[in-house]
Image (spheres, rainbow, N blue to C red):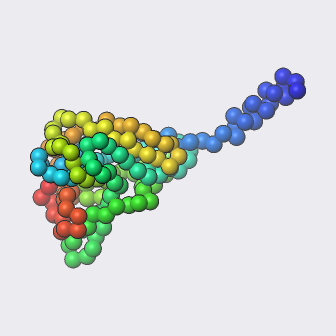
Amino acid sequence: MTLKTLFAGACALALATPAFAEIVVKDAYARSSGPLAKAGAGFMMIENTGAEDDRLIAAKSDIAVRVELHTHKDMGEGVMRMMEVEEGFPVPAGGAHMLQRGGDHVMFMGLKGPMEQGQTVTVTLTFEKAGDMVVEIPVDLERQPMQGMGHGMGHGAGMGASN
């Protein structure tokens, strides 16, 4: 095998490598409804600056017994229900997916202690293609909901904008 053939093969291999999703997390924050709350949530903008679609498929953190990907579903008659999204959240190539109050979010269930203003929560986000990403999320109990949407912590309960 000549050096020229070896170089050509290496170039072909490099060009055949798939373009992976490149994930960037922005404007992340976490909160609970109060010091005695048994649940909390994490919110953020997840951007995919890569050329390949990806999907957030799991999250984990030591601050809670269970961590799940959740969304709110309108059950009709003004009742919203929080539910797990087992398939995760798509993050399209060149696009973004917003995790926000009243919508998709990371749910911390069975908090092991209070979430305190200014504290930082370590969360590992798992993406289908990009793999694990560890993010440090500040706790912000004072941040107001976007567009007046509340984030209740009770599963299956009617949720208003009081949080």
Residue 95 visible to an observer of this rendering: no
Residue 43 visible to an observer of this rendering: yes
**Residue 9 relative to residue 94: left or right:** right
Q: Residue at x 18, y 68 (%)?
A: 158
Quadrant for residue 16, please give it: top right
**Residue 95 relative to residue 74: left or right:** right
Q: Position of residue 120 (x, y in %)?
A: 24, 35
Picture layout, residue 96 above or below residue 102: above
Quadrant for residue 70, please give it: bottom left
Q: Residue at x 43, y 46 (%)?
A: 126
Viewer-proximal residue among 135 and 96? 135
Quarter of the N terminus within the rendering:
top right
Q: Position of residue 80 (x, y in %)?
A: 24, 68
**Residue 14 relative to residue 33: left or right:** right
Q: Residue at x 15, y 51 (%)?
A: 37
Viewer-proximal residue among 38 and 80? 38
Q: Position of residue 131 (x, y in %)?
A: 49, 42
Most extreme residue toward the right is 1
Viewer-proximal residue among 19 and 139? 139
Picture layout, residue 76 above or below residue 64: below
Q: Residue at x 42, y 55 (%)?
A: 89
Quarter of the C terminus within the rendering:
bottom left
Disc tally is 0
Most extreme residue toward the top is 3
